Image (cartoon, rainbow, N blue to C red):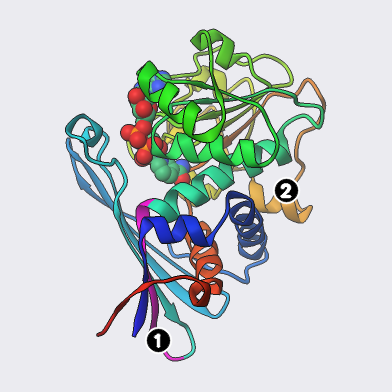
Amino acid sequence: MIPFFSGANVVEAVSPERALEAVRDAFIAYARGEWTMPPKVYVPAYPAGDFRAMPALGGGHALLKWVTSFPGNPADGLPTVTGLVLLSDASNGLLKAALDAGAVTALRTGAAAVLAAEVLGRPDAATAAVIGAGVNGEAAARTFVARGRRVLLWDVDESRAQAVAGRVGADVAASRDEALAADLLATVTPGREIVLEEGALRPGQHASLMGADGPGKAEIAVGELARVHVFCDDWEQASHNGDLVHAVEAGVLQRDDVAQLGDVLLGNAEGRRASEDITIFDSTGLAIQDLAIALAALERADDLDLQTIDL
Ligand SMILES: NC(=O)c1ccc[n+]([C@@H]2O[C@H](COP(=O)([O-])OP(=O)(O)OC[C@H]3O[C@@H](n4cnc5c(N)ncnc54)[C@H](O)[C@@H]3O)[C@@H](O)[C@H]2O)c1
């Protein structure tokens, strides 16, 4: 019998703080070469959205996430991100668990946004803001709050920001400019329009750019990328999809200009250089992050009342 973790089970099994710790360890294991990850495969179904097949191997297990990004779905009352995570035993190939991909994705995306902000932001950063209060923006806000920060939220749909603020214990920013002035930013918008225009970030700020995770998307202008100190989750993935590809194609960014978060965590790459440095973290989302959450959930399987699948 294979345990199935519904979205609610995933949330019950893995707290935002546990998620952050697990995702940090996964970035380090990946940077060391202990965990491996073939490139994410995009299956475009535009203009409606796209599917992604995301495999990873590590911790004695293999994982496949089959997940979507359909940005128009919320208008029909449907989630943008849905799908399934399959976790298998890497010693014999047997399936060990199935998990709701939306919940796993939100937990690890919130964890990565806050981890990058804590690692790359100024040590004395005081304020945090999340731009885009959808499912994954809510996860980022919840993780900031779990780490003891006051969080401002801003969304083009104010009712969404208000609902999330009530659920996670955050505040709604009085204006977009107030949110954009925070020391630590996480942008989690659909990536159809630029959030950070050239000149938007001020010295000392950090922004975790989570929304532009696929072809054709961007949350930051190429001119702004040229002004800041750029980090990413994985160069191979990030230089082909999302924010960085536009700057790479324009010849503004090259491999040597960009450090991977795992290499910074390992001490193999330089992080923030000075308090006036402006840092950005471009996330396209890695299967190793999903593996970290799936393994953390599996640790709790015996404590939870889970449905099972009989193959
Ligand atoms: N990097 C990653 O690992 C990762 C993981 C999951 C999702 N994503 C991406 O993040 C994005 C958001 O995903 P979601 O599931 O939270 O979607 P969602 O539809 O639930 O939420 C998006 C929110 O952004 C708001 N918004 C739209 N344009 C905005 C703007 N210009 N400024 C402020 N708010 C704006 C919308 O009103 C909505 O509340 C998608 O593009 C998705 O593909 C990335």
Q: Is residue 76 visible?
A: yes
User: Residue 184: where, in percent of width, then height?
Assistant: 65, 27
Q: Residue at x 48, y 66 (%)?
A: 294
In the rendered view, does 170 fall on the left or right side of 84?
A: right
User: Residue 266: where, in percent of width, then height?
Assistant: 75, 56
Q: Residue at x 66, y 61 (%)?
A: 25
Q: Is residue 3 inside the magenta stretch?
A: no
Q: Is residue 100 inside the magenta stretch?
A: yes
Q: Nearer the viewer, residue 123 or 243?
A: 123
Q: Residue at x 42, y 71 (%)?
A: 305
User: Residue 205: where, in percent of width, then height?
Assistant: 68, 22
Q: Nearer the viewer, residue 42 or 252?
A: 42
Distance from the alpha carbon under mark 1 to that under mark 2? 33 Å
User: Residue 214: where, in percent of width, then height?
Assistant: 36, 41
Q: Judging from the image, what secondary structure is the residue with disc 1 in?
A: loop
In the rendered view, does 249 fall on the left or right side of 33?
A: left
Identity of the amino acid at label 1?
A: Gly
Badge 2 local density, few (<14 within 10 Å), some, or many (20+)?
many
> Which segment did they paint magenta?
92-102
In the rendered view, does 113 fall on the left or right side of 301?
A: right
**Circle 2 is placed at which residue position?**
264
Q: Is residue 241 visible?
A: no
* Front tag of 1 and 2: 1
Labels 1 and 2: the sequence-earlier one? 1
**Circle 1 is placed at which residue position?**
93
Query: The C terminus lies in which quarter of the figure?
Result: bottom left
Identity of the amino acid at label 2?
A: Val
Q: Judging from the image, what secondary structure is the residue with disc 2 in?
A: helix
- Quadrant of the rendered image containing residue 99: bottom left
- Quadrant of the rendered image containing residue 279: top right
Q: Is residue 196 above or below residue 15?
A: above
